[in-house]
Amino acid sequence: MIFVNSMSDLFHEDVPGEFIESVLGIMAEAHWHTFQVLTKRSDRLAQLAPRLSWPDNVWMGVSVENQRWADRIEDLRKVPAKVRFLSCEPLLGPLELDLEGISWVIVGGESGARARPIDPQWVRQIREQCEEAGVAFFFKQWGAFNEAGAKVGKGRAGRILDGRLWNAMPKPLAGS
């Protein structure tokens, strides 16, 4: 997998549509790589999606940190990408998700000096929703807090949930 730039948003309003088209074109040419594109600007993504080419090796996702941002999922469903995913990181509250048309959910806690704790029950609820919907679930990290809720720092918190690693990867959506 290749991350083009993990610190920017391709669908920011200052990024010209022609540039986005060009980036997706280059990704299509590099068909041997899988590209994950993540945005918080789901409204612009939905607006531009019909005019963009979506190569099979481009996975499209939106950030959903808490229930306030769950409406981004509706915009993501409008994108004809083979893999559509949610990044629930940092997870800042419980989520009730409609996972129709979603291939993959990534969950993780917040890290950094001012990290807010993640409740293990929030993670379990998302995992259960994924299992019920047949959606791949990937638990990335606890962040700065361990499963018991103690602040230990990102490097020591780990990513074990209920005694195991959760590393499911998505399957492309049928008919996308």
Image (cartoon, rainbow, N blue to C red):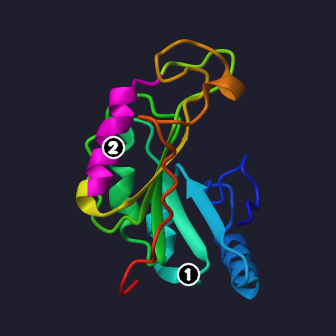
Q: Residue at x 29, y 39 (%)?
A: 125
Q: Quadrant of the C terminus?
A: bottom left
Provide the secondary structure element on which disc 2 rests.
helix
Is 119 magenta? The answer is yes
Q: Closer to us: mark 2 or mark 1?
A: 2
Residue 134 position, x and y percent, is 30, 64
Q: Which mark is residue 28?
A: none
Q: Which residue is mark 1?
A: 54
Q: Which residue is mark 2?
A: 126
Q: Relative to the observer, which residue lies in front, 116 or 137?
A: 137
Q: Relative to the observer, which residue lies in front, 82 or 127?
A: 127
Q: Main secondary structure of the magenta part?
A: helix
Residue 41 position, x and y percent, is 52, 52
Residue 144 quadrant: top right
Q: Earlier in the sequence, mark 2 or mark 1?
A: 1
Crowding at mark 2 (Cα within 10 Å: few <14, some 14-19, many 20+): many
- In the image, residue 71 above or below residue 30: above
In the rendered structure, the answer to whether residue 152 lies left or right of residue 76 reads right
Q: Residue at x 76, y 55 (%)?
A: 5
- In the image, residue 172 above or below residue 37: below
- In the image, residue 44 above or below residue 67: below
State which region is magenta: 118-131
